[in-house]
């Protein structure tokens, strides 16, 4: 977990969990495993957070779209989310559920690797006189740092 971040509505800081001993970590893992096995066991509050609007860099405060909404969620919920995400990623890789060309959010695949694969696929098809179709979507407006 990232340290020096907001703990959310309840003051359980990531630093506290980071510095706990083996017994506390095993207890947390047992709790998370029980929640994992029984999906309705997670505290309902974990799905909630405190939302705060923050002005985006170099934006005018008078416009609604000049703000980014940040949700401060529970530290234990963040930890559980990371555990579930890692388990699902592992499951997808082991079972080969994703196409080999799917690279989004998959380590160690990079944008450059996908771009090269895509370009090579186009070249191969054009060399065979096949028609090639592609769609480009510009997400620049959707994200601040694209």
Image (tube, grey):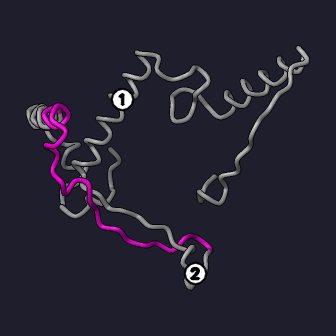
Q: Residue at x 23, y 43 (%)?
A: 18
Is residue 40 in the magenta section? yes
Q: Which residues are magenta?
A: 33-58
Q: Quadrant of the N terminus?
A: top left
Q: Percent position (x, y) of residue 90?
A: 38, 23
Q: Is residue 113 left or right of residue 34?
A: right
Q: Is residue 140 left or right of residue 90?
A: right
Near mark 2 (Cα within 10 A), the count class, few <14, some 14-19 or many ≥20, is: few
Which of these two is toward me, 88 or 54?
88
Which badge, 1 or 2, is on the more N-terminal residue?
2
Which residue lies under the disc numbered 1? 88
Q: Residue at x 30, y 35 (%)?
A: 84
Mark 1 secondary-structure assignment: helix
Kindly identify which numbered label has been placed on residue 63. 2
Near mark 1 (Cα within 10 A), the count class, few <14, some 14-19 or many ≥20, is: few
Q: Percent position (x, y) of residue 103?
A: 58, 30
């Amino acid at each position: 977990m990232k340290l020096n971040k907001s703990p959310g509505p309840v003051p359980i800081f990531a630093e506290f969990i980071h510095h706990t001993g083996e017994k506390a970590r095993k207890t947390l893992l047992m709790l998370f495993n029980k929640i994992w096995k029984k999906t309705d066991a997670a505290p309902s509050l974990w799905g909630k957070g405190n939302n705060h609007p923050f002005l985006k860099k170099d934006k005018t405060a008078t416009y609604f779209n000049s703000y980014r909404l940040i949700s401060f969620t529970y530290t234990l919920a963040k930890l559980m989310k990371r555990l579930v995400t890692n388990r699902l990623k592992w499951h997808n890789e082991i079972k080969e559920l994703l196409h080999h060309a799917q690279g989004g959010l998959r380590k160690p695949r990079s944008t450059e690797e996908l771009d090269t694969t895509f370009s090579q696929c186009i070249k191969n098809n054009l060399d065979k006189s096949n028609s090639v179709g592609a769609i480009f979507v510009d997400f620049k407006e959707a994200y601040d740092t694209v």
